[in-house]
Amino acid sequence: MVRKGKQRSFVCSVTVIVALSMAVAAFSAPAMAASVSGEITVAGGKKLKNMVIYLEPADEKAAEAVKNYRVTQKGRVFNPSVMVVVAGSSVIFVNDEDQEIDHNVYSLSRTRKFDVGLASVGSELVVDFPEPGTVKYYCSVHKFMEGTIVVVPSPFYMLMEEPGTFTLKNVPEGAWKLNAAISHRRYAAEPVDVSVSDGSVDSVSLEISRKRKKKATE
């Protein structure tokens, strides 16, 4: 973690800033790019919400993008409260309050545990997110403040507010796995292999189902 004042002098490898109230992150189309589309279904018809579907590179042709992520802390609220970042990038947490209000940002998530300490107005603190997974974070000063960062392995993803059809654009050639990050801990997706080689790929089906209970060991 790096502390910074109003003057910035830092170089960090960070990717797109995305508020999950939006749908698909926009990227410049690489050469020979295509779209991957299909449908997400949930076994049993459960109405799961806010699923992030994404492509995970399965060979060396995976593409990378580099941009900035920022989470502000204004009005005692994290904004955006939910965002997607690409693994290997960083997030800048900015205390942008109009009044002299301190904040602390911390997480006990397995994917990324961190604690930035007490941050005064104007502080900008950087946290890196090297591994894919879901990170829930909080402010120890204001118990009602919380946010979520979904770390995905590539910049090709989409927020789905409910099951249905999807389209991921500007996907380069190569072998990929289609997967989903789901907030409901009792459900999981079965990854699907996707090969992009000659034009767009459609009719891809990804099913989400209830996790099987582990058998008790004697």
Image (cartoon, grey):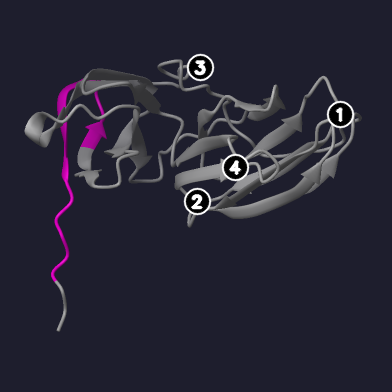
Callouts 3 and 2 close, C-beta under 8 Å: no
The residue that mark 3 highlights is: 28
Report the residue at 58% width, 35% height from top. 144
Report the residue at 41% width, 18% height from top. 24
The residue stretch that appears in magenta = 194-215
The residue that mark 2 highlights is: 131
The residue that mark 4 highlights is: 138
Q: Is residue 193 above or below residue 111?
A: above
Q: Earlier in the sequence, mark 3 or mark 2?
A: 3
Q: Earlier in the sequence, mark 1 or mark 4?
A: 1
Q: Position of residue 185 (x, y in %)?
A: 30, 46
Q: Position of residue 141 (x, y in %)?
A: 71, 42
**Total tally of numbered discs in the picture:** 4
The answer to whether 92 appears left or right of 52 in the picture is: right
Task: Tell me which amino acid carries mark 1.
Answer: Glu
Q: How far is mark 4 from mark 2, CA to CA?
A: 19 Å
- Badge 3 element: loop
Is residue 22 within the magenta segment?
no
The residue that mark 1 highlights is: 100
Discs 1/2, front: 1
